[in-house]
Amino acid sequence: MSNSTLIYGKNAVIEALEKGDRQFNKILISSCSRADVKIEQIKTLAQKNGIIFQFVAKEKLNSLIQEGRHQGVIAQLSPIQYIELESFLEKNKDTLAPVVILDGVEDSHNVGAIIRSCVCAGIKGIILPARRGVLINSTVEKTSAGAINHIDIIKTNSLVNTIQKLKENDYWVIASDHHSEQNYYDIDYKDLNFALIMGAEHAGISRSLLKLSDFKVKIPMLTNFNSLNVSNAAAIILFESVRQKFAKYNS
Amino acid sequence: MSNSTLIYGKNAVIEALEKGDRQFNKILISSCSRADVKIEQIKTLAQKNGIIFQFVAKEKLNSLIQEGRHQGVIAQLSPIQYIELESFLEKNKDTLAPVVILDGVEDSHNVGAIIRSCVCAGIKGIILPARRGVLINSTVEKTSAGAINHIDIIKTNSLVNTIQKLKENDYWVIASDHHSEQNYYDIDYKDLNFALIMGAEHAGISRSLLKLSDFKVKIPMLTNFNSLNVSNAAAIILFESVRQKFAKYNS
């Protein structure tokens, strides 16, 4: 992440929190920080504004900003404005608005490439968990080739709640899981308001989310080397949905 | 690229060239280097062994190895053994052996992800130009998740000659080009010995290669944001070929 999306040092972070005109991803606090008045103030302001703060090893902070300059506090900002699920649903209530849910995808390049494919494939929203995986940072922005500005991005504190809410709103939840029986191309996407869940690079999709899914699909392979990059897997499924839509228009 | 695949300093590079047991990608020489006896020796040894050397700005070398240590010479090694097109064709003469040609793809993450998808999709060979784009380095190796060890990788001094040779051997050449009329899913891949060309991230496919192609295909999109990541585009086309093959088995 470039420095342009980081604010560091206790006073600078407090000032940004008080001013309130920046979009925060999260605030990282060194686990070695002594609990002083300013750290307490940061925690209080963060809680008040619904911003996540996490205690992390000092080395993590040093990898982002040279030691001695961050004073144990770094705020990660977002280059975009996240929107609320409720606003997204309200805005799209009269139309199909398929979404992609990233369950803890950790590599910014992957998230950027997925958002790019999503925009090309007519996906209307991306849903990211606030605590795990990456949020929108400058690497995601760059890798997305600007696509982050052409899609609604929703940050949620609970993917379980979000998926339940989507289901109440007549979404069909599809999980990409290579242990599944069903093939991704056997789903009929044409008139389906779908929410496609893609799992983290190594861990895959959480069991709690798999349980909530209406379909679990795999991408069948021609070899035993069963290991696709997550952004490639997403592209394959999304563009099967596009292929079916074009086939429908032409038939 | 990590240091494990770089050899630097005049003596070290000469020694590796003389020993001859390492696979070189190319040798970078600072354009500020004075023509001394050792640089001349490196050039002679490289030419004798068919290894490319290129004169580059000193800053390029400094970005790979701290200034003062490389003495104006860095050799980039390959973690794998490339094979010759002739051996590849001979080895696969009795079977379909589809290949993917990367025409100057510049990002190691993209090349790694493409190789990974290729292995999953039953592609038998990857063809890379020796002078443009990236060759196999440690970032490609890592991003490929080990896939570089499950496919033949061919390095060529001329993609034009290589494609002509493939055509003489009954390959059908497919170019991925978003200006095309034909859609990628309108090709019948099932019994086709194909060579799929993917172009560089910004420049696309060279005109000389487009001219040699039997088919030019586009990936139709649902929005005007017409910009897929090259590894995602490759995955979409390759897995359409896989989908068709499975459909064939099941019909």
Image (cartoon, coloured by chain):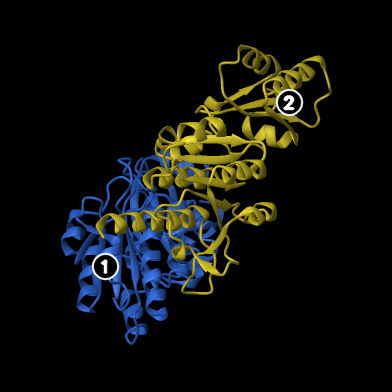
Chain colours: A yellow, B blue
Q: Is residue A171 left or right of residue B51?
A: right
* Residue type beneath disc 2: Gly
* Residue type beneath disc 1: Ile
Residue labelled with disc 1:
B187
Give the total number of marks visible in the rendering.
Answer: 2
Secondary structure under tag 2 reads: loop
**Residue lying at the far right of the rendered structure:** A35
Label 2 lies in what chain? A
Circles 1 and 2: CB atoms closer than 8 Å? no
Q: Is residue B38 visible?
A: no
Expressed as whole percent of the image width and height from the top left, the position of residue A2 reads: 53, 31
Expressed as whole percent of the image width and height from the top left, the position of residue A49 reads: 67, 21
Q: Which mark is residue A250?
A: none
Relative vertical location of residue A52 with respect to residue B115 in this rendering, above or below = above
Which residue occupies 35% across, 82% down?
B92
Label 1 lies in what chain? B
Q: Nearer the viewer, residue A140 or B220?
A: B220
Which residue occupies 56% across, 20% down?
A22
Q: Which quarter shows the C terminus of chain A?
A: bottom left
Q: Are marks 1 and 2 on the same chain?
A: no
Secondary structure under tag 1 reads: loop
Q: Is residue B203 left or right of residue B109?
A: left
Expressed as whole percent of the image width and height from the top left, the position of residue B146 reads: 54, 65
Q: Nearer the viewer, residue B41 or A99?
A: A99
Residue labelled with disc 2:
A72
Task: Specify the quadrant of the image occupied by residue B164.
Answer: bottom left
Q: Nearer the viewer, residue A237 or B14?
A: A237
Q: Specify few, some or many for label 1: CA neighbours under 10 Å numbering under 14, 14-19, or 20 or more.
A: some
Q: Is residue A155 left or right of residue A207?
A: left
